Image (tube, rainbow, N blue to C red):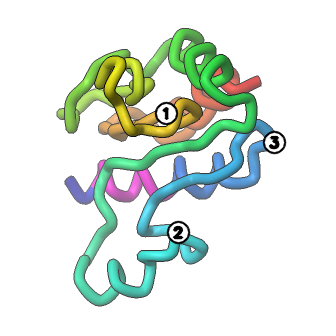
């Protein structure tokens, strides 16, 4: 879990400035509204994060489809990294924002994960 959390923090930091990303939700980022509370309560910030994409639902679906290293699945994950379009996974009654992509970061090398996500977003 420590390695997954470290990887997730690197991925979150790398994707925050990406031009296709409007927000990265991850408590390990200093810019996250829950960061101060998370720092008090946690030793690490976990492996889950989400992205909001500027291109809306279409951009989110495209990014999920283009990811090659991350596996498309709905789960909190295991050793492998996962990606999903949450609103599609939840179905018609979903309250998830249509531009939201959820990630569960695994044990792959963070450089590989970042490269895969960047190419999926470009």
Q: Where is residue 95 in the image (x, y as percent from the top left)?
A: 38, 38
Q: Which element carries disc 1, helix, strand or loop?
A: strand
Residue 63 colored in magenta in the image: no
Image quarter of the C terminus: top right
**Residue 29: which numbered mark, if any?**
2
Please give the label number shown on residue 67. none
- Residues under numbered marks 3 and 1 in contact, where contact means CB atoms less than 8 Å apart: no
Look at the picture and state if 45 lies above or below 60.
below
Q: Label 3 near label 2: C-beta < 8 Å?
A: no
- Disc 3 or disc 1, which is closer to the eye? 1
Q: Which residue is drawn at 67% across and 22% down?
A: 59
> Where residue 6 appears, x then y in whole percent?
39, 58
**Image point (29%, 58%), residue name:** 46
Find residue 19 and name its label: 3
Q: Give the range drawn in magenta.
A: 3-9
Question: Mark 3 or mark 1, which has the lower sequence index?
Answer: 3
Label 2 or label 1, whichever lies nearer to me, is 1
Q: Identify the residue shown where x is 32% and y is 18%.
A: 91
Left or right relative to 57: residue 9: left
CA gap, disc 2 to disc 3?
Answer: 18 Å
**Which numbered disc, 2 or 1, marks the residue that appears first in the sequence?**
2
- Residue 44 place in picture, x, y as percent: 30, 69
Q: Between 16 and 56, which is closer to the camera in this rendering?
A: 56
Q: Residues within 10 Å of mark 2 (few under 14, many from 20)?
A: some
Residue 70 drawn at (x, y percent): 42, 22
Q: Main secondary structure of the magenta part?
A: helix
Q: Which of 80 and 57 is in front in this view?
A: 57
Q: Distance between the residues labelled 2 and 1?
A: 17 Å
- What numbered label is drawn on residue 101? 1
Does 13 sit above or below residue 105? below
Q: In which quarter of the image is residue 43?
A: bottom left
- The part of the image, by quadrant, that contains residue 31 is bottom right
């Amino acid at each position: 879990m420590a390695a997954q959390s470290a990887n997730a923090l690197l991925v979150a930091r790398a994707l925050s400035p990406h031009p296709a990303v409007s927000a990265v939700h991850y408590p390990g980022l200093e810019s996250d509204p829950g960061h101060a509370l998370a720092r008090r309560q946690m030793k690490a910030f976990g492996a889950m994060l989400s992205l909001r994409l500027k291109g809306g639902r279409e951009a989110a679906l495209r990014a999920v489809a283009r990811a090659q290293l991350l596996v498309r699945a709905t789960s909190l994950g295991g050793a492998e990294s996962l990606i999903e379009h949450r609103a599609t996974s939840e179905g018609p009654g979903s309250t998830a924002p249509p531009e939201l992509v959820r990630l569960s970061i695994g044990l792959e090398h963070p450089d590989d994960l970042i490269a895969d996500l960047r190419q999926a977003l470009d």
